Image (tube, rainbow, N blue to C red):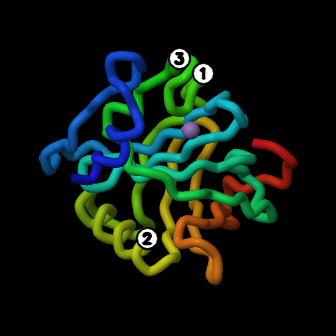
């Protein structure tokens, strides 16, 4: 049950976050979605989520994504979130897991480089995540073009780096 960890941490009588469910294998042709939420919790961070297998694979990115390929941003894998979370913004009440304000910072489509279909994107992204090196192309308002997630060796399985790939969208700015 991919959402068991997500649900166990939350009391849905108290938090406005969606309980959600794992979506059935989508017959839709719409692109996979990604979202980055700015989460002002005890420590401000950003949450990157990529649609995969009817749920959202999720990473907490303390410094947030960057469009500068020189910035390697730590991304800590966290529990899968329901697809409905891609539209969630609001206040998680005090005392609840992740208490604080969640805002949608960016959102758009996600695909694997060279993939000819949504299903092929999912297969390639899944394979990349399993292998510890995963490339994907985002089409958001702030985040555009190629990115990679690279798992850090010799650290916890959960530690990854999020890196902008060098392409026409890359910038040399300090911040996005
Ligand atoms: Mn968070």
Q: Is residue 53 left or right of residue 130?
A: left
Q: Which residue is mark 2?
A: 129
Place of residue 69 in the rendered image (x, y in percent of width and height, measured from the top left): 75, 63
Please tell me which of labels 1 and 3 falls first in the chain. 3
**Mark 1–mark 3 distance (CA, rounded to whole Å):** 9 Å
Query: Where, quadrant-wise, is the C terminus in this rendering?
Result: top right
Q: Which residue is mark 3?
A: 93
The residue sitting at 72% across, 50% down in the picture is 66
Q: Is residue 20 above or below residue 163?
A: above
Q: Residues within 10 Å of mark 3 (few under 14, many from 20)?
A: some
- Judge depth for marks 1 and 3 and give the one in front: 3
| In the image, farthest residue toward the front | 95
Q: Is residue 84 left or right of residue 43?
A: left
Q: Nearer the viewer, residue 128 or 114?
A: 128
Residue 76 occupies quadrant = bottom right
**Mark 2–mark 3 distance (CA, rounded to whole Å):** 33 Å
Q: Residues within 10 Å of mark 1 (few under 14, many from 20)?
A: some
Quick check: marks 2 and 1 in contact, CB under 8 Å?
Answer: no
Q: Which residue is mark 1?
A: 101
């Amino acid at each position: 049950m991919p959402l068991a960890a997500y649900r166990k941490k939350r009391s849905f009588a108290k938090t406005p976050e969606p309980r959600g469910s794992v979506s059935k294998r989508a017959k839709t042709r719409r692109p996979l979605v990604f979202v980055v939420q700015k989460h002002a919790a005890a420590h401000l961070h950003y949450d990157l989520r990529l649609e995969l297998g009817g749920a959202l694979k999720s990473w907490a990115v303390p410094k947030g994504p960057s469009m500068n390929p020189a910035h390697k941003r730590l991304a800590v894998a966290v529990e899968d979130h329901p697809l409905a979370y891609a539209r969630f913004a609001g206040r998680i009440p005090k005392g609840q897991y992740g208490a604080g304000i969640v805002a949608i910072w960016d959102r758009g489509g996600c695909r694997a480089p060279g993939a000819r279909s949504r299903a092929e994107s999912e297969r390639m992204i899944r394979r990349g995540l399993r292998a510890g090196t995963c490339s994907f192309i985002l089409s958001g308002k702030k985040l555009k073009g190629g990115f990679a997630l690279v798992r850090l060796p010799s650290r916890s399985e959960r530690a990854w780096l999020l890196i902008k790939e060098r392409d026409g969208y890359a910038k040399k700015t300090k911040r996005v």
